[in-house]
Image: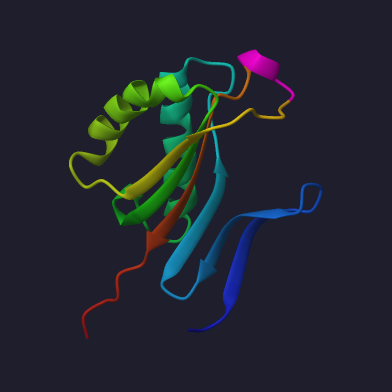
Amino acid sequence: MGEIIRHDVNKDYAYSGFVEAGDFIFLSFCVGNVGGTVEEQVEGALNDMRDRLGQVGLTLTDVVKMDILLRDIWDIPVMEEVFKRRFQGKYPARKTISTEFAHIGGPDGLKVQIDGIAYRPRKAE
């Protein structure tokens, strides 16, 4: 399996932005465009995820599982429209739940957070 590599370690809040463990990459707290519309925040979270994956040579296509946290569960249709554009039929498995965020932006701040698991395909020998 090799070593476990932790990236973007946040000592203040005690988490890693993403972790490489074998063929899997575990991504936490992907957010973006905080304070924007739900659509803008979903796009921003996916951009954040894409950028982190890019650091290890992967793309959103390599994401196999996502957990999406929404402030308002009725925003799922907006999220799904963004996913249709971004994943173009290569959708990861997902779980979507509603939660209240304890965030400095308050009710007008953070509306979307996405965590994910990506798979690093083995190269043919």
Relative to residue 47, is residue 71 depicted above or below? Answer: above
Residue appearing at x 69%, y 54% in the figure: 15
Residue appearing at x 24%, y 31% in the figure: 85
Residue appearing at x 29%, y 51% in the figure: 61
Q: Residue 46, image x and y in percent?
A: 42, 37
Q: Is residue 110 left or right of residue 75?
A: right
Q: Residue 55, image x and y in percent?
A: 48, 56
Which corner quadrant holds the C terminus? bottom left
Where are the magenta residues, as a range?
Answer: 104-108
Report the colour scheme: rainbow
Q: Quadrant of residue 24?
A: bottom left
Q: Main secondary structure of the magenta part?
A: helix
Q: Is residue 57 visible?
A: no
Q: Residue 27, image x and y in percent?
A: 52, 53
Q: Is residue 97 visible?
A: yes
Q: Quadrant of residue 80?
A: top left
Q: Residue 63, image x and y in percent?
A: 35, 53
Q: Quadrant of residue 56?
A: bottom left
Relative to residue 67, is residue 104 depicted above or below? Answer: above
Residue 71: in magenta span: no
| Residue extending farthest right | 12
Give the total number of marks visible in the rendering: 0
Relative to residue 103, is residue 108 depicted above or below? Answer: above
Q: Is residue 55 left or right of residue 11?
A: left
Q: Is residue 89 left or right of residue 35?
A: left
Which of 46/92 is in front?
92
